[in-house]
Amino acid sequence: MALSKPIMNLVASYLQNLYLHPIKTKAITSCVVGTAGSVASQLVAGEKLRLDPVLAFGLYGLAFGGTIPHYFYELVERLFPEDLVAFSLAKKLLFERLVFAPFMQAFSLYTLARFEGKNHKAAVKQLYALYLPILEANWKWLTLFQVINLAFIPPMLRVLFMNLVGFGWAMFLATKRRQQSQRKSE
């Protein structure tokens, strides 16, 4: 019981901030989750902790990881309102999987490379090497989570839910980017 009160207070504080300051709260959450995913990926791989990818994932989460999805989910709710649009879940899912996911994967790969200090040419080269395999993995592994997100998670909590799923995805993405960099340097 003693442990549950601080946890409940933390959850209540988070939900209050999510309600009062949704963009800031989602950005900070995305920053923390992206940073943790990058650190976990390196630790699981048994590597020495490198700061550049950790900072890149954190900065990406802070600048874009909470804000872009926040506005995307607002747009989806306006385009496909459940009470007015037939098959709104299917339409939301198709829109997210076929429009948003491809854009976000390209944007994420390029931006993360730039945040790590790579020049434009190197970032584009990495984007070309990783884009299709990562997009296919996204479609394969994250579609079920997106169905759950769109069908059962309240709109205010969708970015948080996908951030939690994104912890594992950040580990996967960091691992793929690291493997590609290692192949390039060999």
Image (spheres, rainbow, N blue to C red):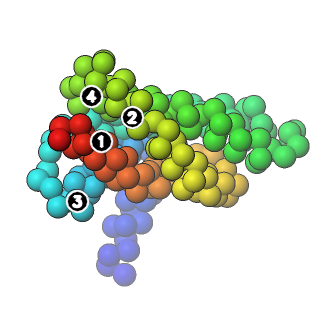
**Alpha carbons under labels 4 and 2: distance apart:** 18 Å
First in residue order: circle 4 vs circle 1: 4
Res 93 quadrant in image: top right
Residue that sits furthest to the front in the current view: 186
Q: Secondary structure at mark 4?
A: helix
Residue that sits furthest to the top in the current view: 120
Determine the residue positioned at 44% across, 41% down. 26
Residue type at the position of mark 4: Phe
Q: Nearer the viewer, residue 73 or 53?
A: 53
Q: For residue 180, which numbered disc appears in the image?
A: 1
Q: Is residue 79 left or right of residue 85?
A: left
Q: Nearer the viewer, mark 4 or mark 2?
A: 2
Q: Nearer the viewer, mark 3 or mark 2?
A: 2
**Alpha carbons under labels 3 and 1: distance apart:** 14 Å
- Vertical comparison of 168 with 21: above or below: below
Q: Secondary structure at mark 2?
A: helix
Percent position of residue 99, x then y? 63, 32
Q: Is residue 64 visible?
A: no
Binning the other alpha carbons within 10 Å of mark 3 as few (below 14), some (14 to 19) or many (20 upward) gives few
Residue of label 4: 115
Percent position of residue 120, x then y? 30, 18
Q: Is residue 112 left or right of residue 90?
A: left
Determine the residue positioned at 63% across, 41% down. 97
First in residue order: circle 3 vs circle 2: 3
Q: Nearer the viewer, residue 128 or 112?
A: 128
**Tag 4 near tag 3, CB within 8 Å:** no
**Alpha carbons under labels 2 and 1: distance apart:** 8 Å
Binning the other alpha carbons within 10 Å of mark 2 as few (below 14), some (14 to 19) or many (20 upward) gives few
Q: For residue 129, which numbered disc appears in the image?
A: 2
Residue of label 3: 45
